[in-house]
Image: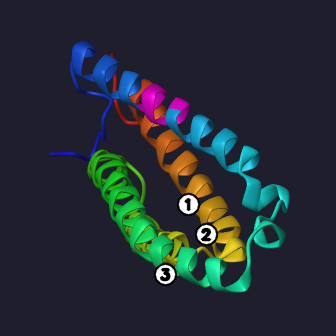
Amino acid sequence: MWEKGLYPLSLPIKVFIISYLILVGVGLLIALWVVLESPIIKGESINEQYSPEALQEMKSAMFYENLKKAHVHHLGHIFMVFSLVGIYAFTREKNNIKIQVIVWMTIITLIHTLAFLIYSKILLIVFGSAYAILMAYIMIIIFIDCIKQPKDSVS
């Protein structure tokens, strides 16, 4: 049924899918901007402003704040990944490539969220970048599949 991918879908469905891709793409760009502007990425530190005891108390309190933020962050990723991968699964791409992309996307999303929880700068950068690259790849494949006619199809 899906040998022709997303191309045979009606125009309103394709417009919906492409509009969704644009919204997700803009969201990813905004997230990238926020990350690049964050004090942690810029290397700014608040350690010298507080006593060691106050810093320890802040770290304990921040763990629960980070846990809540990581949970919301993770749910956002799950929504984006699940919805985009759901569409991606119906594209004309080879099944073995789709499976690899989906599995890697799952692993990367989990590690990226863990990095947010423990606030590991290097894990956030590495797995956030890998996440963005895979998301961009998935969105490009979906877009191409919506607009490019299958080779064996005659209009």
Locate the C terminus and report the quarter of the image it occupies: top left
Callout 1 environment at 10 Å: few (<14), some (14 to 19), or many (20+)?
many
Residue 22 magenta-highlighted: yes
Q: Position of residue 145 (x, y in %)?
A: 42, 36
Callout 2 environment at 10 Å: few (<14), some (14 to 19), or many (20+)?
many
Would you say 99 lies left or right of 42 here?
left
Disc number placed over residue 127 in the picture, else none? 2
Disc number placed over residue 147 in the picture, else none? none
Would you say 122 lies left or right of 16 here?
right
Instruction: Looking at this view, name the residue that lies furthest to the left.
Output: 1
User: Residue 54 is drawn in which quadrant?
Assistant: bottom right
Q: Residue at x 74, y 71 (%)?
A: 50
Locate the N terminus and report the quarter of the image it occupies: top left
Q: Amino acid at mark 2?
A: Phe
User: Residue 42 is drawn in which quadrant?
Assistant: bottom right
Q: Position of residue 112 (x, y in %)?
A: 52, 70
Task: Give the residue at mark 3.
Answer: 60
Whether residue 73 appears in this view of the structure is yes
Q: Are marks 2 and 1 in contact (CB under 8 Å)?
A: yes
Residue 153 magenta-highlighted: no
Q: Which range is magenta?
A: 21-26
Q: Residue at x 84, y 71 (%)?
A: 48
Q: Amino acid at mark 1?
A: Tyr
Callout 2 secondary element = helix
Q: Amino acid at mark 3?
A: Ser
Task: Give the residue at mark 1.
Answer: 131
What separation in Å lies between label 2 and label 1 (alpha carbons)?
6 Å
Callout 3 environment at 10 Å: few (<14), some (14 to 19), or many (20+)?
few
Q: Is residue 96 above or below residue 7?
A: below
Give 78 or 48, whichever is nearer the viewer: 48
Would you say 78 lies left or right of 132 here?
left
